[in-house]
Amino acid sequence: MNLDTREPVVQNLGVLETAALLRELTAGLIALTDFDEALLALVRVTRDAVAGVRWCGFTALRAGEPAGVAASDDRLGGLDDLRHGPDSPAMSAIRRREMILAADLAGEPRWPTWTARARDLGVRGVISAPVDIDDQVIGAINLYAGSPDRLTPKHQLTAMLLAEHAGLLLAAVRDRGRQLALASERDASQLHNGVVGQAVGVIMTQRGCPPAEALEVLRTAASSLDIPLREVAERLVRTVSRPRDN
């Protein structure tokens, strides 16, 4: 990784600031299940927490194809979107698997089309760091400065730590999203599955609630009684089907 360490590391690391950033990111993403929502939270927290970074963006790839972008400022969203062209700092970081730094975009020769668009939007410097998420999704976090030479070795170190931490958090978000989707599929199956579906119908009638809420009531009862969901459903159906004494 092409990290410039000519200045003293202790002086530039900003340990407390970086730790605060990572803690805030963890708090903001720990319960999320939507990947796009997590990306947006990531770039906004980073923009607000890292001094000298005016904007932040994220570029995601799934199986080599564009899989989403996030921008702290909608005006700059196109800079992170590979559908506007693959020649960019983010794509260089992803391809080379190393951090990319352009401290001053004036005269930058590597991405001429991208650089012209970035400068028109007020961007004067960029750091892009690759982010490994899981076997299917990779990406890059992009830190933008509004003045040349604003991005320092401190920002490079912060970007490196941020990329590592963000990869872990985003992988967890995707995993929770998959688990939620599987649970939804199971719910749909159970709602049409014999006695459980009947019990859900009973609860809906009694409480005037939707199917998902009724199923959750049934699950809560099963957990509290420490018995299988189907057994709780059978008990409920038997109870309401029992003839009442006159």
Image (cartoon, helix red, strand yellow):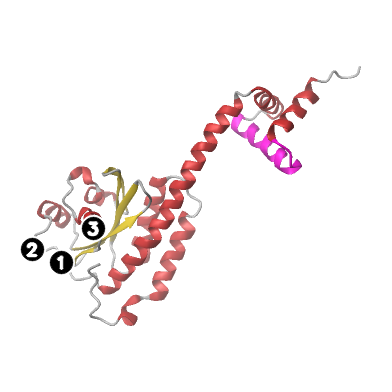
Marks 3 and 1 sit apart, C-alpha to C-alpha, by 17 Å
Q: Nearer the viewer, mark 3 or mark 1?
A: 3
Question: Pointer 3: what residue?
Answer: 93
In which quadrant is the C terminus drawn?
top right
Q: Examine the image and state in which quarter residue 4 appears.
A: bottom left
- Res 234 seen here: yes
Mark with earlier residue (2, 3): 3
Q: Please give the range of residues in magenta.
A: 210-228
Residue drawn at 69 percent across, 24 percent down: 195
Question: Label 3 neighbourhood size at 10 Å, few (<14), some (14-19), many (20+)?
Answer: many
19 lies above or below 181: below
The location of residue 242, given as percent across then percent down, is 83, 20
Q: Nearer the viewer, mark 2 or mark 3?
A: 3
The location of residue 230, given as percent across then percent down, is 69, 31
**Which structural element holds mark 1?**
loop
The location of residue 46, given as percent across then percent down, is 36, 61
Marks 1 and 2 sit apart, C-alpha to C-alpha, by 8 Å
Residue drawn at 67 percent across, 24 percent down: 201
In which quadrant is the N terminus drawn?
bottom left
Question: Pointer 2: what residue?
Answer: 107
Marks 2 and 3 sit apart, C-alpha to C-alpha, by 20 Å
